[in-house]
Amino acid sequence: MPFEISYFHGRVLAEITAWPADVLADYARLVELLAAHGPSLRLPHSRAFGDGLFELRPRGRSGIGRAFYCFLVGRRVVVLHAFIKKSQQTSDAELKIARKRLKELQHG
C-alpha cells in the first residue's frame, strides 16, 4: 500500500511546479519512489535531518531542488517546504522554515 503525498500549503506545490522542467521531472520520479518505499528511501534520493524531518533531493542540468517532508500516522507524507538550491550547503533559513512547519504539524 503506497504512502499518500500531500503538501503543507498550496504555495509549496506552486513553488515545486515552478521549478525548471528537468528538476521537476526528477522530483516527480522521486515522489513516486517515496510513495512506494516511504521511510526506507535513503541517499542519494532522500536524507534524514533528525526529529522526523527529511529532504527529497531532485536534480537536473539546470539546478538542484530540495523538498523537506515528514511522515504522519496513516502512511501519509507531508511536503513542508521546497526550494531550488543556490549554494552547496542548504541554508539555515530554508531549514528553519521546514522545522517551523514540522512543529506546527506535530503540535497543532
Image (spheres, rainbow, N blue to C red):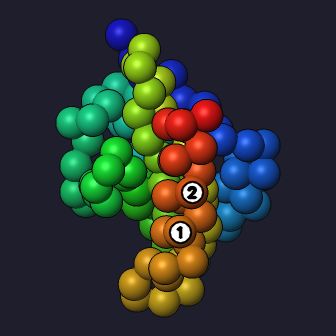
Image spot of residue 12 (x, y percent)? 70, 51
What's the amino acid at mark 1? Answer: Lys
Circle count? 2
Residue 68 in the image: state x and y as whole percent: 48, 54
Q: Is residue 95 visible?
A: yes
Query: Where 74 falls versus 92 (above or below)?
Result: above
Q: Which mark is residue 8?
A: none
Query: Up-down: is 67 above or below 95?
Result: above
> Residue beneath label 1, please?
96
Mark 2, residue position: 100
Seen from this angle, which residue lies furthest bottom? 87
- Whether pointer 1 and pointer 2 mark residues with C-beta atoms closer than 8 Å, the reply is yes
Q: Residue at x 36, y 36 (%)?
A: 33
Q: What residue lies at 53% left-to-right and 68% top-to-bottom?
A: 96
Under mark 2, the amino acid is Lys
Q: Is residue 29 visible?
A: no
Give the distance between the C-alpha atoms of the residues marked 1 and 2, in whole angstroms.
6 Å
State the residue at coordinates (59%, 51%): 101
User: Secondary structure beneath disc 1?
Assistant: helix
Other residues around mark 2 within 10 Å, as few (<14) / some (14–19) / many (≥20): few
Is residue 40 or residue 29 the one in the foreground? 40
Please say if 12 is above or below 40: below
Could you tell whether 26 is left or right of 81 in the image?
left
| Residue in the image at 21% along x and 36% along y | 40
Image quadrant where residue 73 sits: top left
Q: Secondary structure at mark 2?
A: helix
Q: Dividing the image into 4 quarters, which one contains the C terminus?
A: top right
**Neighbourhood count class around disc 1 (C-alpha, 10 Å): few under 14, some 14–19, many 20 upward:** few
Q: Position of residue 64 (x, y in %)?
A: 49, 73
Of the 4 image quadrants, the one containing the N terminus is: top left
